[in-house]
Image (tube, coloured by chain):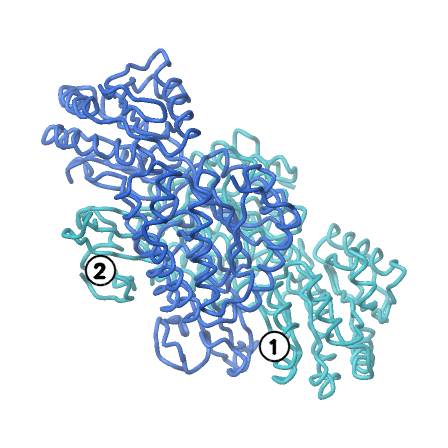
Chain colours: A cyan, B blue
Amino acid sequence: MYRDATIEEINDAMSQAWNAFLIYRKMSLKRRADFMRAIGKEVENLGDELLKVTQEETALPEARLRGERARTIFQLNSYADACEKGDWLEARIDAAVPDKTPPKPDLRKMLIPLGPVVVFGAANFPYAYSTAGGDTACALAAGCPVIVKAHPAHERTSEMIAGAILKAAANCYMPSGIFTHLHGFSFEVGKALVTHPLTKAVGFTGSFAGGKQLFDWANQRKDPIPVFAEMSSINPVFLMPEKMKQSAEDVARSYASSITLGVGQFCTNPGLIIGIDNDDLNNFILVLSGQIEKAIPGDMLNPGIFKNYVEKRAETLSQKEVETVAVSSQDPVINQGAPTVASASAQAFLNNPVLHHEVFGPFSLVIRCKDVAEMTRVARHIEGQLTATMMATDDDVRSNPELAEAVQNICGRFILNGVPTGVEVCLSMHHGGPFPATTDARFTSVGADGIKRFARPMCFQNWSNDLLPDELKNENPLKIWRTVDNELTKASL
Amino acid sequence: MYRDATIEEINDAMSQAWNAFLIYRKMSLKRRADFMRAIGKEVENLGDELLKVTQEETALPEARLRGERARTIFQLNSYADACEKGDWLEARIDAAVPDKTPPKPDLRKMLIPLGPVVVFGAANFPYAYSTAGGDTACALAAGCPVIVKAHPAHERTSEMIAGAILKAAANCYMPSGIFTHLHGFSFEVGKALVTHPLTKAVGFTGSFAGGKQLFDWANQRKDPIPVFAEMSSINPVFLMPEKMKQSAEDVARSYASSITLGVGQFCTNPGLIIGIDNDDLNNFILVLSGQIEKAIPGDMLNPGIFKNYVEKRAETLSQKEVETVAVSSQDPVINQGAPTVASASAQAFLNNPVLHHEVFGPFSLVIRCKDVAEMTRVARHIEGQLTATMMATDDDVRSNPELAEAVQNICGRFILNGVPTGVEVCLSMHHGGPFPATTDARFTSVGADGIKRFARPMCFQNWSNDLLPDELKNENPLKIWRTVDNELTKASL
């Protein structure tokens, strides 16, 4: 185990990050992008040794890790492309109108970086949402130095990836302090990082308790700073009557896979399934149960997550209104998550807040409703979510507008006839949602729009063309899209 | 004086706003825009009677009020245009790629409204940042119903404008609850509004104490909500040596006007002027003093603001390191703000936090520095600001990059050779800035980008074309700009 960073080391890291910020933010979009791509290459160069170490630390299977590594490199490359393309800068120019009363000055605006960003790695994504993951990539694209607090559950992995980042930084002549890697088992390290005066924003993926604590610390600062924390989500799935009549069994099979995928350790795991208590739902449960019973318990990420799963699962199953519907028939050994499905009535769900809690692991709770009106009541009682899904024909959606609206109110991504697991990395993705899914529903942590979390607009009034940043110069040397006098254009002025 | 809203009235207002939200958010961009334009017309229709009432309440001169009313109507119309144009929706489409492993689903994203928005009117802008002001216009454009708490200092004005809004709402067949007007002298009304479960965002313009209180209440909710509070700003002005050599006297004259404009009651009033202690600065101070002595004290907005000005001015002038440089030679009567300029050394400023406080009114403090290095130290000690200005030749800027950077770090709008007063309403404007200028430097309260404060992204995954909102349909019926497979286009799919 690595030693926790001391307060002196944290102060040093932040001062160096600040100095790096003053240099890095002036580097061209191309240099930022090249640096990000170089990180991707260096992560790749770590080869199978990286996979071996991560497997030892997280119990994640090799195939998953290969996929996640590829995703991480794809993120770095695609956010680098977006960085260089510059759409995210929201460049805007309004020409001066000297003969207006009063005269209208020349005004030009673009996003500039916030400053040093502290990133907390996620337990469940040792690559894609940790050291060189989405938050780090977005912050670097925005022009911000990054300070990563390694997740204690995969600190050797984090060390290796930090080494790759630092190698890329050296090769790209980045300023010292552009990236710092710290360890911290104690919450004091996290607190010192979030409350440090030179920290300008925070990215976090993890538990509600962890994310909310960072959010509170950040807001209690003398100068509050933005925290984007992606926290808990139970990703409700609404089974609509016509769709269920047509294909209850197919739906059951795809959900059995989604619930057990990655031993249920995804933030988009479908933890709540809401249907109408009829023969179709019984059929669905029958098939789902068969699949869950056949499902093989898998090793969970670490003993802490395993313990948490066992406890939360037991707590839910022990509620007097909850019936255990299916458990994997293969006995799990220690550290394994037993796939489990339970059920309860809508009334029980509405009355018992315990049933709204996330059980992080291969667990789902089926809610039996009398009718769509009751499903709607359930939807209205669910807190903010990353995703919500309707398994529905077009007619199901059209004839139940109130339910569709209630569902839209609680989520950031609304899926029709699919499963919530699987988060595509692209500009149209929104991985965010109303509290407590995240601390700010207006931003995403997946896709290049996530860059905007770490940037703020700056308006340059009456600057001479020579002094303006290239992004805002008359001749548009970077050939980026800009809104000039209210019209999007790549033209020069 | 109007009676404070009761808790029952607040609960009623919020429930009705929520019901209105469910209808209003489905209305087309065109209908929202038409409603906003209709509000502008109805405000205009209030005629001179409105100006008369506001003059009685605020002591603002008629010409200013005519200008502010025109600005308010312009805001409503121009944000309506922006609303309809749809650039702000950030519509994004990524086509499905079924043969990818795993298959990439069809993903489409756009901004949707947050829900009911509570707006607190500003004392100093009874029209433009109050009842039908910028926050209300932005929220309506985003698709959010609005609940305005009238500013007690111009509650009759607010009533009249609320009447105009409700008339426009009726004429446009808006749902009941789309707009509610409440009074509240007691802070309990504000607290009840900000902490109500159906409130989804807050807009505020006013004092630091007021804005910070709303921010804290909002963050202490079970589900924190965004608060955009535009608070205090002293708008530092940096006088650079070459520029001063060329035109110290012209600069002094334009700043005398800016300091006294509107009896100094603008959030962009230049409250701090930083220069190098030499003959040019003495010259500047001499001319500025002459102008300030000639300036006529004006009536302040209300007795509360007058009392505050007298107290804060006295507090600053009584600091032992502060020298009073010039005061209007005409004795002010009660409720009038006496134009005043004081000065202090950089050392005094750096050591005394009292000198960093806003003195809301026609007051400015000149800081005498030894050299540009000391000006830079001063810049680094100033908190977040709406604006910062450099009076500088291009060479002044180029030869002092550290100062230019320090200035950029603290502001949202960076003016070269101009005055901070005068906030143009256009897309390139940024009226925001690091804390404590606002509670979130990533958003603006002036210009159509302010709409985004009240909206969040929603991703539609795998929806059939018929079910999608028009904004995201294949055929692009609204002809808006969308990013399709990473390229901005108005084309259909």
Q: Amino acid at mark 1?
A: Leu
Q: Which mark is residue A416?
A: 1
Foreground residue among B382 and B112:
B112
Classify mark 1: residues with Cα within 10 Å, few (<14), some (14-19) or many (20+): many
Question: Residue placed farthest to the bottom in the image?
Answer: A246
Q: Give the residue pinned by disc 2.
A: A476
Displayed quadrant of residue B138: bottom left
Q: Amino acid at mark 2?
A: Asn
- The answer for how far apart the CA atoms under marks 2 and 1 are is 42 Å
Left or right, A459 with respect to B398, comes to right
Left or right, B215 with respect to A38, comes to right
Q: Quadrant of the C terminus of chain B?
A: bottom left
Chain letter for the residue marked with disc 2 in the picture: A
Left or right, A23 with respect to B187, comes to left
**Residue drawn where x is 26% and y is 37% of the image:** B389
Residue A116 in sight here: no
Quick check: B348 above or below A144?
above
Q: Earlier in the sequence, mark 2 or mark 1?
A: 1
Q: Position of residue B289 (x, y in %)?
A: 19, 21
Chain letter for the residue marked with disc 1 in the picture: A
Left or right, A493 with respect to B107, comes to left
Residue B248 in sight here: yes
Foreground residue among B167 and B403:
B167
Q: Position of residue A317 (x, y in %)?
A: 85, 61
Callout 1: helix, strand or loop? Answer: strand
Callout 2: helix, strand or loop? Answer: loop
